[in-house]
Amino acid sequence: MKKPNRLAWMPMAAVTAVLLSILVFLYAKTQSFDESHFFEDIAVLRHLKQLDAQWELDVLKSRIGVNAHYDALADNQGEMARLMEQLQSDTDAHKHEASGQAGKLPILQRAIQDKAALIEQFKSNNSVLRNSLAFLPTAAEDVQQSLGPGRGAAQPEFRQISAGVNRLLLASMLYSQSPTGDKGAEIQDELSRLEGGMQLVPPGVRDRLGIFRAHIQTILREQKTVNELLVGISAAPTGKLLDDAHDALTVEQQQAGAEGERYGRYLLIFSTVLVALLLYAAVDLIGSHSMIQRVNQELQGANETLEQRVRERTMALDASETQLHQITDTVPALIAYIDAEQRFQFYNLAYEERFGLKREQIHGKTMREMMGRELYEKERGKIEEALAGYAAQYDRTQETADGQMHDYVMQYFPRYGEGEDEGKVLGFYSLGTDVTELKRIDRMKSEFVSTVSHELRTPLTSIRGSLGLIVGGVAGDLPPMAKNLVSIATSNCERLIRLINDILDSEKIESGKMRFDMQVIELVPLLAQVLVANEGFAGQHKVKLALDVQAEGVMVSVDSDRLTQALTNLISNAVKFSPAESWVYVRLLCSARRVRVEVADSGPGIPEEFRKRIFQKFSQADTSDTRQKGGTGLGLNISRAIVERMNGSVGFTSQTGVGTVFYFELPEAVAPPVEEAGVAASRIRDGGPVRPLILVCEDDPDIAHLIKLMLDKGGFDSDMVYRAAQAMEQVVKRPYAAMTVDLGLPDLDGISLIRALRHEERTRDLPIVVVSANAEAGELEFNNQPLAVSTWLEKPIDENKLILSLQRAIANMAEGRPRILHVEDDLDIQRIAATIAQDFATFEFAGSLQEAREQLGKHHYDLVLLDLTLKDGSGWELLDTIEALNPAPPIVVFSASDAVATETQRVEAVLVKAYTSNDQLLRTLQRVLDESLWGTVHPPLSV
């Protein structure tokens, strides 16, 4: 029984499948000939025709100025574009076969787009035309008013211009309504006559005539363009194309209706057959209930098997998560996953240990709850940056469970979704590395470097100074062998000093502590100076130096000392690797506001494998180079860092066996309007007392004795003290001309000693020269007190600099010189002005009006140099105070702004900073002092 039934189902199933296929085909065909979408398309075409007509009407309204706004044009354009898109979409969906509509639509769409482009251009030109037409009467009225009835009666040419303006106004209005070539030519002729008379009127009238003429010219130009665009818009074939599309769609609708009726009849016939077959199948299926139950049992067994597999996979996933926790828990860093709602969904053991929290206190908590409100608000931007899909990194300090503050480097990495969530940020991974120990080590390194700076530089100062004095003959003539040994010691001492300086410079650069005094200088003199300084070194290697200047007068903004250091390193390398009797060329080029300095040698070149790391610290192409050529491997690294800090770049080109060219590039600068202070600062007085007495305050007896020997050789007598307290006692016992101070004193730091000396009336003006291994750091701390310290000298001591600094400091404080109060809040201007006048006057400073009034009340001054723009008011406010003094010192205004004419009668001279050279300032001060009361009892200062 069952077997025949199963065999009978096979042909029945085949017949059923065939019938279903036929029915599906017939249904699809009847749907494809559905007439409803034809009605929609016809309605769209009709709407398009209405919009097209309305479009042209709006254009005409805009043309004649009835419609001053273009919203209607824009709305029609947008609506037509939408309808065309709808029509195209419907055509693509139904694939009409009997009509050429599909081919007509692109043509129609292009026509509409072309017409839209013409209308857009029309809107632009017509708006300009309408604007000029609207403002033309106003412009004409402005011209008539500027001419005025009085002028017109007095001058006939004004009447002609007035009449011409009226004629042009009328002609332009008529031309805008009926543009013709004759009318345009008439307007052009009238414009020519108007232009001829414009030179006869005042400038104010001429400007108004220019505005009126510009409107006339705009009307002539734009009216022609608007007319041409209207012709183009009218000629656009959109109306005919819409009619053609409408006709084609109507024909297609009729054909589709006939085809739909035919396939509908076929569908009815085959549906009847299928219903009969299904009735037969239903009767047969009623007897197959037992088979269905068996299938259900099999499905239930399969479901249980699937559930078992799911449980196994879940257990494997749990095991994987446990393993992940075990791995991350061993990492000494904060690892977590935060979802899009900023809640913790995963974290390692470090979070619980560092912050003393349990699992339930962390899981699901927000970052705001975990970090606290203050820290969260501070780092909120980084969190939002990670959730926006960008990796973020920042430093964070946070208190741990033991109450200690730990430093972390936090990194956030966004997590993107997959599948439906592809491209969406689901959260981010957080990695926090504890760098507390690293920062502690970094502080230890800085302290070590500071110790090295002091403990190595101080004895080296003594060694180099002593060797220099011996070589200079202080201890008498030396035997040849001893002189050779001293020369070797001196050379190696200098080498050790260079090594220490390179290491310390490298650390300063790395920590960002290297100071740069940026000044605009001319580059050629600096290059020449560096070459002269390196000629001795080049001569030792039998190498010659040459300067090739291909750009004169080049100015750059640099720290001249640092640039000299960088260039010296490049020249030193070139000399060391050049063969004997060869040349090293230093070239200066300038192009496109970039200055380039090249150092070219003819050495062996740089090996290819070494070029990638040539600028790294302690890099040597060959370990034997260190022994053969000398050097630390830090020079190029320091040079590149120095140039980059001055907004430049360093590079090289090399060819094996030919030579190497190292170069650096800097932006070209504009020369400053006033002379650099360094030029004036270089002038030193030749006069001075014989054997002036110097007090040397130095905690190291060897260094103190060395300074004493240097001073004795330079023409000074000296006393030595080793503590600040001794200095305070000794300075009142003898009349010292100047004093040297070491900053690292055992009982009181040198900065505090200097401040204490400045508070005493007797030592307030005592010249002080700082000689210390930490002079640069001290200068930074003391930088807000101009000229309180004459010079800051670094150890090891340069004997020439020490002698020159003391001579200049003593000369600046000499008695019988005029005292000038400089009222200026810019410290750099204070130093420059004081340096310019240092040979004949003593400067004191006030940075505000209040300070100036206090200084004037306490001391007498021979001249006041006054800035007008101060932080607490105008310098003019000080004039009443100065004039009330008896005697009142003369006033010289030295300011960035021009003086008010009514106030200049109350001062002796007015100088503008941007236009005053150093020499002009110097001569003005000397002239005013010579003409004042001071000049009546002292010899004249000016020459």
Image (spheres, rainbow, N blue to C red):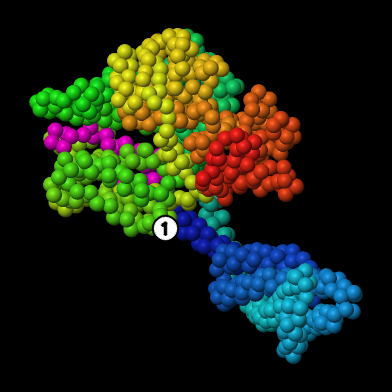
Front in this rendered view, residue 4 or 41: 41
Front in this rendered view, residue 668 or 58: 668
Residue 570 seen in the figure: no
Query: Which quadrant of the structure image shows residue 30?
Result: bottom right
Q: Which residue is mark 1?
A: 592
- Residue 803 in the figure: left or right of residue 385: left
Magenta-drawn stretch contains 631:
yes
704 vs 834: above or below? above
Residue 898 seen in the figure: yes
Extreme residue toward the bottom, this view: 182
Q: Position of residue 678 (x, y in %)?
A: 44, 40
Q: Give the residue at x 40% y 20%.
A: 694
Magenta-drawn stretch contains 916:
no
594 vs 42: above or below? above
Q: Residues within 10 Å of mark 1 (few under 14, many from 20)?
A: few
- Residue 572 in the figure: left or right of residue 594: left
Magenta stretch: give its range: 626-652
Q: Position of residue 357 (x, y in %)?
A: 50, 12
Front in this rendered view, residue 448 or 697: 697
Extreme residue toward the left, this view: 481
Query: Which quadrant of the structure image shows residue 936?
Result: top right
Q: Give the residue at x 43% y 39%.
A: 683
Q: Position of residue 220 (x, y in %)?
A: 72, 80
Amino acid type of the residue that numbered disc 1 sits on in the rendered structure:
Ala
Front in this rendered view, residue 281 or 931: 931
